[in-house]
């Protein structure tokens, strides 16, 4: 094929190049010359073809001599690389598997180990309040005001809680409200057995029902009067447990110290003992106090919706404080309405009884409790003797106080009303026509103090009274409060509250003469009328 093409090319080229000379010769000569030329070209072409074949053969030999790749070795290398990648992935996955789960949401910041045995939770509560008093003009004041309208930071609480080794819960909660720093909660709770757990540290005393309600879930800005006859926080150890009812099929565990709701719960403990409405930091006497409470939801799980949320119980305490400081009591507007004489002390047997109940059914809620408190009160002074200073009791009495409270509420937007508060179906969003949850409430609460604490111990005929325990011109005998309120839950974390409180008093008012001297006359303290508001952020 190559030879034929080369010959054709040679003839064509020769003809075109030698046409003039061919014309000059005879036909015979021209044929001879042409044949000679063709032979010459054939010779050259032969050489060229041989050279081409030699070069091609050389290339083929070189290609055949080249090393053939080892497919098995390549396959092994690929498999080694793949295994190394798998090992690296396993190591990486193992490291990620050990990292805890972290979640941020409506319940704050939650960190939990993969196995669930260790937990850390950070939450917070901020309450900014405003108090605006009505009809409180006092002509004796230079500016004419009787009570100061004010804004306060009622509560500012970072809350740390968690779980260790699955069954040990803990909680630490300081409070920076009212311009002061104080520790409110600090305890550990060993929950190995649901029916018998052990808590130790500082926490809410197991007595008053409304006191056990979270501050973020309150229906009104301030709790009712019965809570002021019970301790606020106490330090000690408490055995507590919960039991399921006959209609319940499975148990659920809550990480709160006090369970709501449960079929039956109890708490009993021994504490340092604190005065009414007190928040103890460190004990000053040897006297200790036993505090206990039992609470039940008798129809929990029975399938009767109307009474599913009915809870009833009773709490109480018994102790023997010795030379303990006396408490003070405040109104709904956070004004002091009762205080003891400076020489008075709580000294002697003290006990409290607190029957309590609530009922929640759909949007309706009702909570109430009655409080009875008895305590020994002494007027004491310190005298120096040859062996050192000694406390001497001049006068003593047994004080019996009582208080009660009833609060009714209704969620206007139809959400469930609960002891833990209200959870809106839809968070407030005016652009989508969602308005959160609205709750209306009304309350009646009363407190009365034993008339014997206002005893005048001055000698008969004396023109100057001596009040050994409490001065009726500065401490009320009775206070009755009614309140109405509206609460707007924008979402689970933000609530706006507005209350109107009106409190009337018996006693507690003094009369001053033209010289500013307090006379012996005792009158009723002026009715307190206060409009108060709160913006609350809880997460």
Image (cartoon, helix red, strand yellow):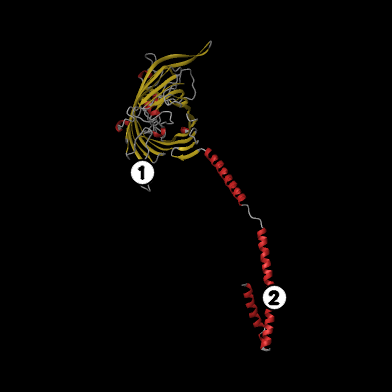
Q: Is residue 184 visible?
A: no
Q: Position of residue 500 (x, y in %)?
A: 35, 35
Q: Kindly identify which residue carries mark 2.
A: 43
Would you say 90 lies left or right of 395 here?
A: right
Q: Nearer the viewer, residue 276 or 464?
A: 276
Which quadrant is home to the N terminus? bottom right
Check disc 1 and report its element: helix, strand or loop. loop
Residue 471, quarter of the rendered image: top left
Viewer-nearest of labels 2 and 1? Answer: 2
Badge 2: few (under 14), some or many (20 or more) residues near its Cα, within 10 Å?
few
Residue 301, quarter of the rendered image: top left
Q: Residue at x 46, y 36 (%)?
A: 124
User: How many marks are shown on the rendered structure?
Assistant: 2
Q: Kindly identify which residue carries mark 1.
A: 435
Q: Nearer the viewer, residue 483 or 262?
A: 262
Q: Is residue 490 above or below residue 177?
A: below
Residue 218, quarter of the rendered image: top left
Q: Position of residue 6 (x, y in %)?
A: 64, 75
């Amino acid at each position: 094929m190559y030879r034929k093409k080369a010959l054709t090319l040679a003839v064509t080229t020769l003809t075109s190049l030698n046409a003039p000379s061919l014309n000059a010769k005879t036909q015979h000569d021209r044929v001879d010359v042409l044949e000679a030329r063709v032979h010459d070209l054939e010779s050259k072409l032969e050489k060229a073809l041989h050279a081409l074949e030699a070069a091609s053969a050389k290339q083929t030999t070189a290609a055949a001599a080249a090393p053939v790749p080892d497919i098995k070795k390549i396959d092994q290398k690929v498999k080694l690389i793949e295994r190394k990648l798998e090992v690296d992935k396993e190591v990486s996955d193992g490291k990620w598997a050990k990292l805890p789960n972290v979640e941020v949401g409506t319940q704050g910041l939650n960190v939990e180990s993969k196995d669930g045995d260790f937990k850390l939770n950070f939450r917070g509560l901020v309450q900014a309040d405003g108090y605006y008093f009505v009809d409180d003009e006092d002509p004796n004041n230079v500016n004419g005001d009787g009570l100061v309208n004010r804004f306060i930071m009622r509560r500012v609480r970072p809350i740390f809680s968690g779980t260790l080794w699955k069954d040990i819960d803990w909680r630490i909660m300081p409070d920076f409200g009212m311009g002061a720093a104080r520790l409110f909660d600090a305890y550990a709770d060993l929950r190995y057995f649901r029916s018998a757990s052990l808590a130790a540290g500082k926490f809410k005393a197991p007595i008053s029902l409304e006191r056990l309600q979270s501050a973020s879930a309150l229906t009104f800005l301030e709790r009712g009067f019965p809570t002021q006859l019970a301790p606020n926080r106490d330090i000690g150890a408490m055995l507590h447990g919960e039991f399921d009812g006959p209609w319940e099929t499975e148990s659920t565990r809550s990480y709160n110290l006090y369970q709501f709701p449960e079929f039956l719960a109890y708490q009993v403990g021994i504490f340092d003992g604190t005065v009414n409405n007190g928040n103890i930091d460190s004990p000053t006497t040897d006297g200790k106090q036993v505090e206990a409470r039992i609470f039940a939801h008798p129809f929990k799980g029975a399938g009767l919706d109307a009474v599913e949320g009915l809870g009833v119980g009773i709490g109480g305490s018994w102790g023997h404080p010795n030379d303990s400081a006396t408490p003070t009591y405040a109104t709904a507007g956070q004004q002091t309405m009762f205080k003891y004489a400076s020489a008075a002390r709580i000294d002697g047997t003290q006990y409290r009884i607190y029957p309590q109940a609530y009922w929640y059914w759909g949007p309706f809620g009702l909570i109430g409790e009655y409080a009875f408190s008895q305590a020994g009160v002494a007027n004491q002074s310190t005298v120096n003797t040859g062996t050192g200073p000694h406390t001497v009791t001049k006068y003593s009495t047994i004080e019996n106080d009582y208080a009660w409270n009833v609060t009714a509420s209704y969620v206007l937007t139809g959400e469930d009303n609960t002891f833990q508060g209200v959870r809106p179906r839809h968070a407030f969003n005016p652009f989508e026509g969602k308005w959160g949850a609205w709750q209306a409430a009304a309350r009646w609460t009363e407190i009365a103090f034993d008339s014997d604490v206002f005893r005048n111990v001055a000698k008969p005929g004396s023109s100057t009274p001596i009040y050994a325990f409490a001065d009726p011109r500065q401490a009320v005998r009775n206070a009755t409060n009614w309140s109405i309120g509206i609460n707007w839950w924008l979402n689970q974390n933000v609530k706006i509250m507005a209350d109107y409180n009106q409190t009337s008093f018996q006693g507690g008012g003094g009369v001053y003469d033209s010289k500013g001297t307090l006379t012996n006359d005792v009158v009723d303290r002026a009715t307190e009328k206060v409009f108060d508001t709160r913006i609350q952020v809880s997460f």
